[in-house]
């Protein structure tokens, strides 16, 4: 007779414990697998040097660019399909490239070629968003400096829009050199310079990552992931000093990374090679020079802590000291304007950040512009998915990167019985750098600190990108040659790249593109340009103007006029334009600023400014309660001794020179 | 020695061509072809050769050469600014001097012995079909960007008419101008009033899109009095409504210039 086993409570407990242990083991296995603990390093794949998919993917990228060109047109060519086709264009541009780049056996030649195609595609998008020439706000600021150099043939002239710009003239020197040498117009010269510098940047970045990871596949994946940072698609391709500065910064890191490879002579050569790039960086952009110095200091500390060879530590320390010395020296030579320029921004950022941490209330609503416009759901979903994918990549790449760096915990004698040791200082540097990623995200939730988060983003991404690449090459795609898996990974990278493009867009993607109040690129259109050009033709250059943020840049560049700004003149003219009547403060402002003309743009009455300010950062918050009243803008119609020499129905000019003269004379 | 001279010869020749192109031709096309290497390649290459750090034409060599050339251009600009204005000839001479100096140093230096300055890139073989694809992609991309520029520039979100009135520098007349930037040809009437007296009227000013109309009116400045002049523009089809209005106030004794 079969007797059923008697199940006692001891058996049940034993079974439960066994089950629990199996569950814990499974979770541990999964966690170890997820984090990559103790796993072998991913396949790096080798393939015969060939063109591979470069030609066909160039063709798909060009077609994608054509599609994007149609959808970015201000003319409604495809009706309600415009936004969908734009997204299709972005996907067609990135998806095939990303899918191919993650493939395990792609030749180094092809990887580099595909990266160049990607960068050309992104540059194409930038050109499509700037059909009238320079379009970004920062581009106008530096255009004004470059134009001044071309007119006066000298450096360090004044720039009322951005007084610090002529003091860091690296970008403008090269752009005007191209104008002088080739005879091309400034825009074409800047276009050439930026194209060359983009290719140098991606080449240097690839070599830097390749030197550190010793894998061209990882380097290529890291580069394509890096392109997803919000500054890369548009801002770092704009005619702005930071665009050139990041090129020098990466060249410095490339030279510095070579210190670890080779003997003492190599260390000397690396220092020699890095020196001109460090010096050029110091005269090109202040903030990038400081951040590069801080990053060099970090790698030096890591090298010392990791007990790197003495020649490596000394060479890195020399580079750090040199970088700090050049940045500081140039700041002293040009009169130390940094505190004045960055101080208010940093102060505001710190205050906002403290507010955020103490109250947990957001000072800036994500995905909502200051004018109240909200990014559509698909755009928000893409940007959030991009962020989540980066976080996932970081989580999966963190320990894999440490493993690849040869990081181990060693038992040592002393108060702390364990010590962390590693072999690859630069990979540890990437890991430490990536730890700052959450901070850049938090900064973006604050109104003032947003700018800092935005500026730090690309530098932190130097650490984020290789970690995500290690996750991709080690786990997401790994050694698998499954086309479906590659497509899934390609789709994930496409989402991060598209997320970067949409974030860089600076607001909702609204197609066809239409004029918006103070929205930089969207506010620059032919009518404003022609009004500025009219002032140059009929009033002559160098008149003193008061105008809003957009017309200031148009007047300075297309009109060659002088504009009154709080930054340069320390005179607030906002209520002069928006106030209900002309009080004594406004009259004083007119007199002190020696204003010749006021430019009134009646379109400002349509909405609140999309970028948060009508004039410049730090303006009176009461200006943002409602759009200005049309009657207030037109109050000069009723003021004696004020002429109105120009009117196009939207933009009106008032000549106040006679009034200012009377005010000066005390009449 | 003969081998070394042969290595650097093409680079020196390119430098001389660049200077000649910049100083002797006005055509931007010629100057661009001749001059761009002088900014983006030759100075960096010469310095890398002089420092003995030149390698074959690898990605690394191209990246470092171009980056270094841009850096050198910046230093050159700063130095030029110390000694005089930044003119095309000065730029060309300065960059060429750095380049030739670098090559001269490379020639004299022992480390320059194994230089291969203009060794071409070793690209994999490219079939005709693939070459066609690459050429096609360049053509499509260039066409798309060019088309988008024309398309955007042809589109006018705002249709408007400009009216202006400015005083001539000598103060004896005012110029009144009208420019049609509407979406269709328009017809205008203009009235000029001085001190509330109609002094001139022009009827039926027909302007095509983009067309401009200018007229001068005598300004009564010599009578020692202050005056106010106003121009009123009427658009046909909007009877009686002042479409644009501009005015000038002047102190007659001190006409503004």
Image (cartoon, coloured by chain):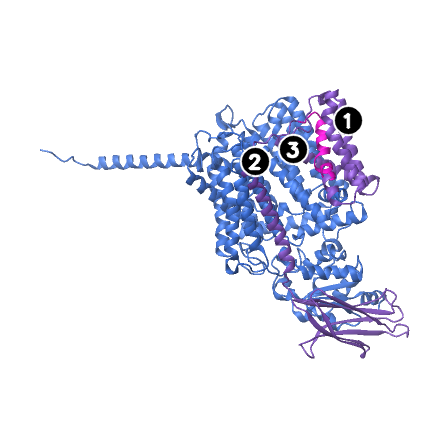
Chain colours: A blue, B purple
Q: Which residue is mark 3?
A: B62
The residues bearing labels 2 and 1 have C-alpha atoms spaced at a distance of 34 Å
Does residue B35 belong to the magenta stretch?
yes
Residue drawn at (49%, 38%) of the image? A100
Q: Residues within 10 Å of mark 3 (few under 14, many from 20)?
A: many
The residues bearing labels 2 and 3 have C-alpha atoms spaced at a distance of 13 Å
| Vertical arrangement, residue A581 with respect to residue A272, above or below | below
Give the image quarter of residue A232.
top right
Circle number at residue B104: 1
User: Are the numbered discs 2 and 3 placed on the same chain, yes or no?
Assistant: no
Give the chain of mark 1: B
Q: Position of residue A189 (x, y in %)?
A: 71, 45
User: Are the numbered discs 1 and 3 placed on the same chain, yes or no?
Assistant: yes
Q: Position of residue B190 (x, y in %)?
A: 75, 75
Asked which secondary structure carries label 3, the reply is helix
Q: Quadrant of the N terminus of chain A?
A: top left
In this rendering, position of residue B219 left or right of residue A600: right
Circle number at residue A264: none
Q: Residues within 10 Å of mark 1 (few under 14, many from 20)?
A: some
- Nearer to me, A647 or B212: B212
Q: How many marks?
A: 3
Tag 2 and tag 3, C-beta contact below 8 Å: no
Whether residue A463 can be seen here: no
Does residue B232 belong to the magenta stretch?
no
Q: What segment carries the magenta color? A: B34-54
Q: Residues within 10 Å of mark 2 (few under 14, many from 20)?
A: many
Q: Which residue is mark 2?
A: A112
Whether residue B116 can be seen here: yes
Give the chain of mark 3: B
Q: Quadrant of the C terminus of chain A?
A: bottom right
| Vertical arrangement, residue A64 with respect to residue A661, above or below | above
Q: Main secondary structure of the magenta part?
A: helix
């Amino acid at each position: 007779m079969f007797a059923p086993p008697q199940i006692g409570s001891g058996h049940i407990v034993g079974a439960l414990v066994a089950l629990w242990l199996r569950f814990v083991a499974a979770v541990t296995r999964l966690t170890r697998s997820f984090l990559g603990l103790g796993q072998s390093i991913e396949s790096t794949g080798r393939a015969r040097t060939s063109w591979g998919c470069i030609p066909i993917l160039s063709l798909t990228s060009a077609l994608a660019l054509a599609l994007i060109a149609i959808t970015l047109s201000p003319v409604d060519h495809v009706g309600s399909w415009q936004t969908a086709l734009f997204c299709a264009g972005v996907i067609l541009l990135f998806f095939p490239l990303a899918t191919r780049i993650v493939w395990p056996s792609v030749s180094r030649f092809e990887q580099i070629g595909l990266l160049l195609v990607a960068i050309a595609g992104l540059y194409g998008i930038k050109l499509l968003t700037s059909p009238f020439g320079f379009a970004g706000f920062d581009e106008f600021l530096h255009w004004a400096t470059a134009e001044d150099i071309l007119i006066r043939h000298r450096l360090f002239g004044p720039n009322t829009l951005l007084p610090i710009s002529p003091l860091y003239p690296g970008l403008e020197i090269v752009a005007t050199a191209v104008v002088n040498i080739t005879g091309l117009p400034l825009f074409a010269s800047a276009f050439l310079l930026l194209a060359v510098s983009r290719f140098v940047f991606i080449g240097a970045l690839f070599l830097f990552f390749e030197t550190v990871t010793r894998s061209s596949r990882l380097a290529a994946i890291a580069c394509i992931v890096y392109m997803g940072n919000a500054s890369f698609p548009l801002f770092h391709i704009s005619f702005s000093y930071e665009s050139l500065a990041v090129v020098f910064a990466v060249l410095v890191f490339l030279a510095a990374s070579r210190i670890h490879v080779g003997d003492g002579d190599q260390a000397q050569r690396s220092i020699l090679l890095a020196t001109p790039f460090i010096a050029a960086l110091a005269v090109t952009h202040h903030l990038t020079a400081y951040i590069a110095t801080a990053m060099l200091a970090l790698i030096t500390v890591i090298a010392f802590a990791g007990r790197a060879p003495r020649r490596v530590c000394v060479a890195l320390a020399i580079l750090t000291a040199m970088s700090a010395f050049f940045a500081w020296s140039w700041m002293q030579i040009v009169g130390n304007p940094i505190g004045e320029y960055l101080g208010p921004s940093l102060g505001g950022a710190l205050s906002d950040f403290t507010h955020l941490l103490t109250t947990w209330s957001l000072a800036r609503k994500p995905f909502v512009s200051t004018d109240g416009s909200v990014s559509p759901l698909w755009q928000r979903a893409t940007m959030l998915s991009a962020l989540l994918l980066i976080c996932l990549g970081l989580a999966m790449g963190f320990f894999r990167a440490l493993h690849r760096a040869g990081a181990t915990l060693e038992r040592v004698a002393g108060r702390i019985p364990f010590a962390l040791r590693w072999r690859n200082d630069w990979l540890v540097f990437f890991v430490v750098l990536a730890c700052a990623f959450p901070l850049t995200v938090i900064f973006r939730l604050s109104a003032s600190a947003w700018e800092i988060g935005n500026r730090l983003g690309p530098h932190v991404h130097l650490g984020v990108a290789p970690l995500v690449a290690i996750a991709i090459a080690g786990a997401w795609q790994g050694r698998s040659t499954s086309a479906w898996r590659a497509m899934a990974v390609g789709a994930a990278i496409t989402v991060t790249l598209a997320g970067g493009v949409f974030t860089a867009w600076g607001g909702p993607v609204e197609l066809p593109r239409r004029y918006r109040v103070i929205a930089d690129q969207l506010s620059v259109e032919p009518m404003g340009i022609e009004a500025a050009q009219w002032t140059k033709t009929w009033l002559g250059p160098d008149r003193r103007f008061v105008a809003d943020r957009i017309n200031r840049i148009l007047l300075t560049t297309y009109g060659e006029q002088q504009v009154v700004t709080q930054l340069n003149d320390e005179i607030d003219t906002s209520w002069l334009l928006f106030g209900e009547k002309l009080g004594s403060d406004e009259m004083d402002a007119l007199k002190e600023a020696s204003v010749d003309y006021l430019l009134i743009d009646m379109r400002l009455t349509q909405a609140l400014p999309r970028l948060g300010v009508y004039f410049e950062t730090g303006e009176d918050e009461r200006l943002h309660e409602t759009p200005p009243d049309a009657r207030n803008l037109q109050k000069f119609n009723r003021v004696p001794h004020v002429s109105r020499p120009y009117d196009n129905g939207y933009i009106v000019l008032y000549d106040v020179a006679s009034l200012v003269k009377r005010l000066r004379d005390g009449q | 020695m003969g081998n070394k001279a042969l290595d650097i010869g093409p680079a020196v020749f390119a430098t001389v061509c660049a200077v000649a192109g910049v100083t002797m031709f006005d055509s931007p096309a010629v100057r661009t072809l001749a001059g761009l290497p002088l900014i983006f390649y030759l100075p960096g290459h010469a310095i890398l050769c002089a420092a003995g750090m030149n390698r074959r034409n690898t990605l690394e060599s191209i990246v470092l050469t171009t980056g270094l050339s841009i850096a050198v251009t910046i230093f050159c600009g700063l130095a030029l600014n110390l000694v005089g204005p930044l003119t095309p000839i000065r730029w060309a001479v300065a960059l060429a001097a750095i380049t030739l100096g670098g090559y001269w140093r490379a020639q004299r230096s022992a480390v320059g012995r194994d230089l291969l300055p203009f060794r071409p890139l070793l690209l994999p073989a490219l079939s005709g079909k693939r070459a066609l694809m690459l050429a096609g992609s360049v053509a499509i991309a260039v066409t798309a960007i060019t088309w988008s520029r024309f398309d955007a520039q042809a589109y006018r979100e705002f249709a408007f008419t400009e009216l202006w009135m400015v005083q001539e520098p000598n103060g004896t007349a005012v110029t009144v101008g009208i420019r049609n930037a509407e979406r269709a040809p328009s017809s205008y009437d203009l009235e000029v009033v001085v001190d509330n007296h109609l002094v001139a009227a022009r009827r039926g000013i027909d302007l095509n899109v983009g067309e401009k109309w200018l007229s001068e009116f005598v300004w009564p400045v010599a009578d020692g009095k202050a005056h106010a002049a106003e121009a009123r523009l009427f658009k046909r089809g909007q009877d009686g409504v002042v479409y644009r209005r501009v005015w000038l106030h002047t102190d007659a004794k001190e006409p503004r210039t």
